[in-house]
Every structure is written in C-alpha cells, then in structure tokens.
Amino acid sequence: MRVFVEGVGLLGPGLSSWQAGRAVLDETAPYVYAPTVLTASELLPAAERRRTGAPVKLALAVGREAFAHAGRDAATTATVFTSSGGDGENVHQICETLASAKREVSPTRFHNSVHNAAAGYWGIATGSREPSTSLCCYDASFAAGLLEAAVQAHADRAPVGLIAYDHRYPHPLNAVRPLIADFAVALILTPEPTGRTFATLAVSHVQDDAPATAMTLPALEAVRAGVPAGRSLPLLAALARLAAAVVILELAGAGRLRVEIAPC
Amino acid sequence: MQPLSISHYSIVNSLGAGRDAIARALRDARSGLAPCDFETVDLDTYVGQVAGLDDMRVRPDLAAYDCRNNRLAQLGLEADGYAAAVASAVERYGAARIGVFMATSTSGILETELAYRRRDSLTGALPADFHYAETQNTYSLADFVRRYLRIEGPAFVVSSACSASAKVFGNAVRMMAAGVCDAAVIGGVDSLCLTTLYGFHSLGLLSPVPCRPYDVDRDGISLGEGAGFALLEKAPGRAGGVALLGVGESSDAYHMSSPHPQGLGAKLAMRRALESAGLQPADIDYVNLHGTGTKANDASEDQAVFELFGGATPCSSTKGSTGHLLGAAGITEAVISILAIEHGSIPGGRPTQTIDPELRSNYLIENAGARMNRVLSNSFGFGGSNCSLVFGRLA
C-alpha cells in the first residue's frame, strides 16, 4: 500500500528536531552526540503538564513538530502511538512502593502507568476526539506502528499521525532493558497527495531473511541499534535525502516491513 | 465495512473455562466474584480470580514466557478448541497471512512486582531469573501467542487500557481491508496484579462489595482476570453465523482517569460503530454496557446510551458477574454479546438491586429471553480511549 508523508518530528541524542536533524541525516552537517533534551509541552494545561513523565514529553514534542511541519490540525487527525516500554521510571516507582511495607501507590502514578498515557495527554492537549491507538512490539515497535498507521491511512482514507517514542529505564530495570538514549519520531501520513506531501512510502509486509537497513555512520548506527524508536533512522535519512530508497525494518519473527521511499 | 466472519472464539474467566461454562454461569445467574485473597493483598474488595493459575506452567518450549498472564493466555488458547481452529486456518492461509493482534493492560507486571521484593540487598539488582522481555514487557502476550500458535504474520499488542481488546477487532478489519492478512487471531488477556489492585484503591474506585453497575448505591469496581480470543476471517461465514458488523473508535480529549461527564467520546464511538455497520440505533436489540459500577462512569455512559438509543433498548453490564477484566474486558464482553445472540438470552446486569433513578437507559437486572440479530458492546478506558463493536447474524 502507498501513503504520503506530510510532516516529520524528531527528537534524539544530537538530533534536537527534524529541522535540525535532517541536515545531519542527509550528511550536509556533522553528527555531534549530545543527550536528548526534553522540555515540558506548552500544549498542555499547567496542571496536566506537572503530571506528565519524560516519555510523554518526548511524544508530545515530536507530535507537535510533525503537525506544524505538515500544517495539519491535530484536533481532526487520528493517531497511532507506539512505544517499546512506556514509562520505566513510573513502573519503577510503583514496583518499589508495592515492595515496601506501605503499599501506597500514588493515584497520578497509577493513571500514568497505562501504556496509552501519552495518547491520553495528547488528546487533552490537542482536543482531538479522533481514534487513537497505543501499540507495543518490543524492539519492532516503530515498524509495527508504521504498519498500523499506513494501513489505517490506506483503509480509512484519512490522515494519521504516527508517534513513536522510547525512554531509558532507571536502575535496576535498565540492566534487564538497556536503552542507550531517549528517542522519539513522528510522521504525518496521508492516503492521497496534498499540497504539502513531499514523499511517498510504499509499505509491504514480507517474509524475508534480509537484515534490517543500517546507518552508515557508526555513531548513528549505535543509536539505531540501541533504542527501538531509533530503528526509524534509515527511513528518516531517506526522507532527508529525498532520493529513492528501500528500507527494511524488522517485525515479529521472520516478518519484515519493506518501505520503498520516493520523492513526490 | 464488510462483515467479518467470527469463525471461532474462546473464553476463560472466573465464571469458568470455555463458552459453554460461561453461558451456563450467566444463565444460572452465578457470579465469579469472591472476597479478595489474591497473593498478599490486604484490601477490602472482591475479585474475579481464575482458579489453578498458581500451579500451572506454560508449554515447556516457551518456559521463559512463564508468568500469570501467559498462563492465562494458554488456558484461553486451549479452551473451546481455539488453538486447533487456528492450526486449521494456518493450513488454509499460510502462517504469514495471519495476523496476531493482542490486548493487555498490565501484561506480566506481577513478575516484576515480585522480583522487586527479591532485589540484591547491596546492588539493588533484580534477580537473575527475572525475564523482562518475556513477562513484563507489554508485547510479551502477542509474542507468546504467535509462538504458541506458530504464526508468522504481523503481531503486536494494543495497550489502550480498558478499551484495548475491543480495539483489536479494528486492527483486524483494517489489516484485512489493506490486504496484509487473510485472517486474524485477536484477543485480550489481563491477570490480577498488585499495580491495578492498589492503583484503583488509590483512586478510591474499588468497591468493598461485588460491584453493582447502575445501582443507586454503586460505589466502585471489582477487578477480575480473564482471557478471550477470536479468529476473524475474510472468507464469508455461514448464514445464521455471527459476524463483526461494525467498529467505532474515539477519544474523550478530557481527562486521564475520568470519563467525559456528558459521554461525548462514548457517544461518538457508538455512532461510528453504527455508521461502520450501516445501521440505525433502532436496529440494535441489546447493548452490552461498559458499566464498571463507578458513579462517574455509569452516569457518563448512560447519558450517551440514552441520547442515542432512548429508554427502550435493553442494556446490561456483566461486570458484576466477571469483575472488570481491564485489557480483556472488550473481548470478554464481545464473546458474551455473541453468546447472547446465539442463545437468544440477554444476560442480566447483576447483582444490582435498585437502579439509579437518574439513569435513564433500559437497564435489565434479570436475564431475559429475546431474539437478537444485532448487539452493540461498549469498552471505554483510561486516557479517554473508547471503542464500540457491533455483532450480528449473517443473512
């Protein structure tokens, strides 16, 4: 199936936005590693802003950039959120509390513990009553989200915002789930070309032993391999170069997502 | 949308294992709820616990996935000949043409909660026998199910709190419409854990008695655990068989843990489900409510249901019988809706005594015989995530 890319949002180590990161990804600017910088979203009312964890900040930041880039109203657009592990700090705090003598879980921590917390805050921030889903596919969470978003745009004939994000786990969970960075990416996909779409993605699910497409620059390849949402980097690099390319993403088992990128 | 044939389904919860057991329990007005003696929990509440999970283990080749949630998944896969029905679908379509779309809210988090009691006293490290990816991670359930059934199509978990296992029906519809799959294994599993028990307690939402949806004295939810699966196929089903006719999804855009007070998101989901089925409200013979038994949830849902269906369409919530199964609520109530159509019997919304006079929908407390062609089932969750499904007989 074929969908069109209307907007991109990006936040990762040394990649402070899509606008700044695309020059790195098309290799016109050098890649300089720096920790991912998170800021509280101006989209949310102050009371909600105080309650959100870092993963929600990541998700909201890239969503906001992508919708601005697309010039599209978030309030009338469906969304697909995907994350390999949600909010690890929140899980850690709850599990510590539950392992203590007083099992007094904070109500805010509890409602933030749902995997769709970012989607919930996104709805409050944008006022969107459109459908929203929240997926997890461990290391393949970005590819699963891209498949679902493309399928949704194609089947429902409506634009979809895809927001993928992963945040590092704290000690001791980081030992069983080590991620090397905080990373988030958003894509606005449409079923038809619009005045602002700049690339097409032909997406198919294939059974293939082909390895996932890697990054040539070792420092960016480390980010790609080290954080699940970073698996999007080869696709983002193709979008930054705006040249025809094929990117292979790993899905469950022997499944692969084959994405053919072309400028339009 | 094109109706999707539901060629097979299975169900396990505190009412029993298998659709005959569940149908019998509902007919006999039995409840699965009992005073909570789960693990070390010291809360004054009732739970719908599935018997035998402590002593079972998952299939030996998947031992790393062993946890309460995946044990419950295995019970569901083996109930009602479900795994055998999927094996035959694999022969028909090929393993790569079947998708696995699962729902859970807490996955195997109980393993993590227990591991946190066994952290190394010096380093704080988790015990070496803790398997994060195979138990705690939200994807664990879909990975376990796809390996158990040897399926190679796309697989992921939808985790949108209490709407999740209704929403997976939508994933199946879209994947088949886009030509990615010819059939889909969908379902949901959620199991008791301390996070949800103490979490809902912290919100003041756990009832000290079995929950009483729509009762004037309702005072909160009862939690339960359960598994449910369905096999959806693109191929036309047999006449008179039950099919998925419509799916409607929406967001509240209102609050993380409270529903929209006027039920705007709920109404939108129901309206979209009817539109997707090409039906009018008057075409619906019974509404299986989300009906959790909290003051706010039932008031909000009632407003939406009354505005759309008026005061005549029979409605009930079965959460007083099963407890709230969270990520498995949607599939459980989908199966109960299908059973209602097949048996011609509306399950009563027990143990409600006195219906809140401020709620205006036609809430049934007792079982009622009725020929039903079309049923709508509601599932709403934290984060304002709403999904409504329409099931009906194929002409």
Image (spheres, grey):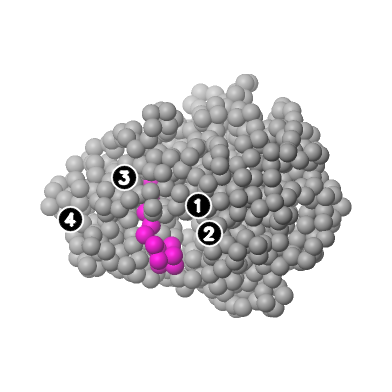
Q: Which mark is residue A26?
A: 4
The residues bearing labels 3 and 2 have C-alpha atoms spaced at a distance of: 27 Å
**Is residue B165 positioned above or below B126 on the image?**
below
Residue position marked by numbered label 2 in the rendering: B272
Which residue is most to the right?
Answer: B28
What is the crowding at mark 1: few (fewer than 14 residues within 10 Å), some, or many (at least 20)? many
Residue position marked by numbered label 3 in the rendering: A64
Residue at image x 21%, y 57%?
A: A240
Residue B352 placed where, x, y %?
78, 41
**Is residue B195 positioned above or below B364 on the image?**
above
Residue at image x 24%, y 44%?
A: A17
Q: Quadrant of the C terminus of chain B?
A: bottom right
Chain ID, mark 3:
A
Residue position marked by numbered label 1 in the rendering: B250
In primary-sequence order, the first of circles 3 and 4 is: 4
Classify residue A201 as left or right of residue B116.
left
The residues bearing labels 3 and 4 have C-alpha atoms spaced at a distance of: 23 Å
In primary-sequence order, the first of circles 2 and 1 is: 1
**Proximity of marks 3 and 2: CB atoms separated by less than 8 Å:** no
Task: Find the magenta span and give its range.
Answer: A152-166
